[in-house]
Structure formats: structure tokens, C-alpha cells
Image: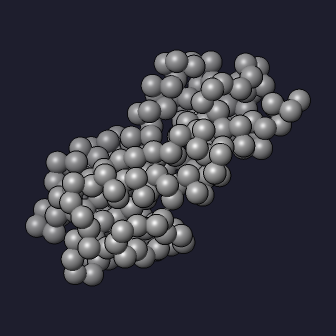
């Protein structure tokens, strides 16, 4: 599918990674692409192989006019819920950009509170180049972070499922209990705590 061109001005694309996992932070990225340096092959990060995502992430970081990555912690997710934590991480990413965008294009159906106009685009990571770029940076950053957590908590297999509720992860949770990086507000984790 050809990616749509955003309206005039320096738009930043914004997306998050990690709403569904039972462990680890939610990560968001904001990217302002350079119209003079297009990047071939941008797409929703979930449709790309890990190797392709890594290669595109390097290209995005070198060619974009500005990019930033931010997160909301497990504690914040448990305190304010995953939707609000995702919006918080998005806001932090936009605020961390080295230049002010004219407007923000947000993947999904909700916009964080920003100091610039924002537009939510459902399926935006497959439609808008800057959102696709943000989805790639958020996903690669989060995956790298989960590999670091795997080194600390190898028994959960974070290197294989990145915290998502796979059969392997649920089995490890039952066997080893809840770690400090698990989201206690998520049902499978909360049930274990109560039992």
C-alpha cells in the first residue's frame, strides 16, 4: 500500500509499542522525516522482519530531521492504565524532539495532549510514512529493552516473546512468580498475585 503524504509543514508521526505485553514499559516514538531524504520500505513495524526493522531503524535515525523515543514505566502503567500510559509516552516522545513539529499524526483513535495540533489516524502505521517510521523506532527500542530485561530475568524468556502473554511466558509466570517488571494490573499477573 502506498504511504500517504502528510499535509504541508513539518509533521511528526507518533506511534507506540508494547500495549499488549504483561511485562516491561510501553514505548513511544515521534519522527519528523526529511521530505528531501525519503526512506524506502517503511511500513507498519509488525509487518517487517526483525532484521528489516533494525536496518530501517538505523536509516531513520540517520535521515530523519528529528526523532525521539520515550516510555512509560510498569509502575505508571499499573497506576494510570495502559491507554493513559501510552498517551503519556507519546507526549514525552513529541516533547523530546529537537525541533517543534507543525502538527502530529498519531497512530490509533486517541491523541495525547500536545502543544501542537494532533490528528489520530486508525491504521496510520500502514498509511503515513512518518507514523511507520515511529512504529519501527518504538518497536526496535522496546525489543532491545526487553533483551536487557531478559539478561536480568532469564527464567521468563523475554528474548523469545518480548513480554507478550504466550504459553511459554504464562508457564514461566506460574513457575517463577511475578517479577518487578511485570504489570500487576494485567489480569494474568493480577490473578497470580491474588492466588
Here the colouring is one colour
Q: Residue furthest left?
A: 36
In the rendered structure, the answer to whether residue 166 lies left or right of residue 110 reads right
Q: Residue furthest bottom?
A: 7
Q: Position of residue 82 (x, y in %)?
A: 61, 52
Q: Is residue 102 above or below residue 32?
A: below
- Count of numbered labels shown in the rendering: 0
Q: Position of residue 115 (x, y in %)?
A: 36, 68
Q: Is residue 111 above or below residue 172?
A: below
Residue at the (42%, 58%) spot, across then down: 91
Q: Position of residue 166 (x, y in %)?
A: 67, 38
Residue at the (39%, 40%) spot, across then down: 141
Query: Can you see residue 138?
Result: no
Residue at the (60%, 30%) spot, across then down: 181
- The quadrant the C terminus occupies is top right
In the rendered structure, the answer to whether residue 83 lies left or right of residue 44 reads right
Residue at the (51%, 25%) spot, across then down: 149
In the rendered structure, the answer to whether residue 42 lies left or right of residue 187 reads left
Q: Is residue 64 above or below residue 22?
A: below
Q: Position of residue 173 (x, y in %)?
A: 73, 27
Quadrant location of residue 194? top right
Query: Can you see residue 103?
Result: yes
In the rendered structure, the answer to whether residue 33 lies left or right of residue 12 reads left
Report the front residue among 134 and 169.
Answer: 134
- The quadrant the N terminus occupies is bottom left
Q: Residue furthest front?
A: 115
Quadrant location of residue 24? top right
Amino acid at each position: 500500500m502506498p504511504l500517504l503524504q502528510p499535509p504541508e509543514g513539518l509533521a511528526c508521526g507518533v506511534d507506540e509499542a508494547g500495549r499488549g505485553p504483561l511485562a516491561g514499559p510501553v514505548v513511544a516514538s515521534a519522527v519528523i522525516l526529511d521530505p528531501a531524504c525519503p526512506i524506502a520500505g517503511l511500513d507498519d513495524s509488525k509487518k517487517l522482519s526483525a532484521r528489516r526493522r533494525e536496518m530501517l531503524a538505523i536509516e531513520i535515525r540517520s535521515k530523519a530531521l528529528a526523532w525521539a523515543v520515550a516510555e512509560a514505566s510498569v509502575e505508571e502503567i499499573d497506576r494510570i492504565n495502559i491507554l493513559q500510559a501510552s498517551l503519556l509516552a507519546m507526549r514525552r516522545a513529541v516533547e523530546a524532539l529537537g525541533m517543534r513539529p507543525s502538527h502530529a499524526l498519531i497512530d490509533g483513535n486517541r491523541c495525547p495532549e500536545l502543544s501542537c495540533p494532533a490528528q489520530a489516524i486508525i491504521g496510520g502505521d500502514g498509511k503515513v510514512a512518518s507514523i511507520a517510521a515511529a512504529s519501527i523506532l518504538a518497536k526496535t527500542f522496546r525489543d532491545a529493552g526487553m533483551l536487557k530485561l531478559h539478561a536480568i530475568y532469564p527464567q521468563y524468556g523475554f528474548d523469545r516473546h518480548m513480554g507478550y502473554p504466550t504459553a511459554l511466558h504464562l508457564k514461566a509466570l506460574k513457575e517463577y512468580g511475578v517479577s518487578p517488571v511485570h504489570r500487576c494490573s494485567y489480569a494474568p499477573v493480577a490473578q497470580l498475585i491474588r492466588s
